[in-house]
Image: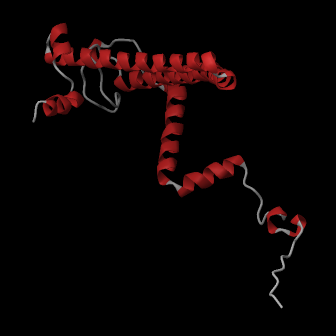
């Protein structure tokens, strides 16, 4: 007689996958805290982000110095107990100006995120749903935004180069930037 292979069937209700979970699922804040404890880089980054937000939102209101009021008696002073980071050329407190700049930077970042959310997400969703010409339009607009950002970066880089070397416009276009030098030098080596 031949050996017969018999399979045993079980119902899905008795399967451990459909059973009750061993522990309660964590809430969102507890999940974030558990992740932050597991990765020190995430914890340090989160603390710095929270500190940045607090300083940029509360800092200008509690600063003892006026943001734009010049004080020629203390111009170009080094750091001191009254001016923690010193003063600039016309006597304004540097720390107060940095905190005000952080607030502006936070507003610009929030605006960029909201713009991307309200314009980019619907455009990408419509492009992926309908495809074809609308998808090509969405991808083309995405690429054009990236090219504009790269071009503005190059303008700033060349302006800084021109100002730092004291040269004119021609020198800023002729002199290659630091990351282009190895490729240019390597192309002449045989």
Question: Which residue is depicted at the point 53% across and 32% down?
Answer: 53
In the image, is residue 170 above or below residue 131?
A: above
Q: Position of residue 39 (x, y in %)?
A: 51, 54
Q: Is residue 52 left or right of residue 160?
A: right
Q: 76 or 54, which lies in front?
A: 54
Q: Can see residue 74?
A: yes
Q: Quadrant of the C terminus?
A: top left
Indicate the quadrant where residue 164 lies. top left
Position of 54 compared to 98: left or right? right
**Residue 75 can be seen in this image:** no
Front-most of 159 and 187? Answer: 187
Q: Residue furthest bottom?
A: 1
173 sits to left or right of 118: left
From the viewer's perspective, is 31 left or right of 50? right
Place residue 5 in its image quadrant.
bottom right
Residue drawn at (83%, 68%), measured in percent from left and top? 15
- Residue 67 location, x and y as percent? 42, 16
């Amino acid at each position: 007689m031949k050996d017969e292979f018999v399979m045993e069937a079980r119902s899905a209700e008795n399967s451990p996958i459909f059973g009750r979970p061993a522990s309660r699922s964590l809430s969102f804040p507890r999940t974030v805290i558990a992740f932050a404890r597991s990765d020190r880089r995430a914890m340090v980054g989160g603390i710095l982000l929270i500190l940045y937000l607090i300083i940029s939102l509360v800092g200008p209101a509690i600063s003892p110095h006026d943001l734009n009021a010049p004080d020629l008696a203390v111009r170009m002073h080094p750091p001191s107990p009254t001016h923690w980071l010193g003063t600039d050329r016309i006597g304004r407190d540097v720390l107060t100006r940095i905190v005000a700049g952080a607030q502006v930077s936070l507003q610009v970042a929030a605006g960029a995120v909201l713009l991307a959310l309200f314009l980019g997400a619907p455009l990408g969703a419509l492009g992926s749903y309908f495809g074809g010409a609308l998808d090509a339009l969405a991808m083309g607009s995405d690429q054009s935004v990236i090219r504009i950002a790269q071009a503005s970066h190059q303008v700033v880089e060349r302006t800084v180069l021109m100002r730092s070397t004291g040269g004119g416009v021609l020198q800023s276009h002729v002199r290659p930037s630091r990351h282009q030098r190895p490729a240019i030098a390597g192309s002449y080596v045989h």
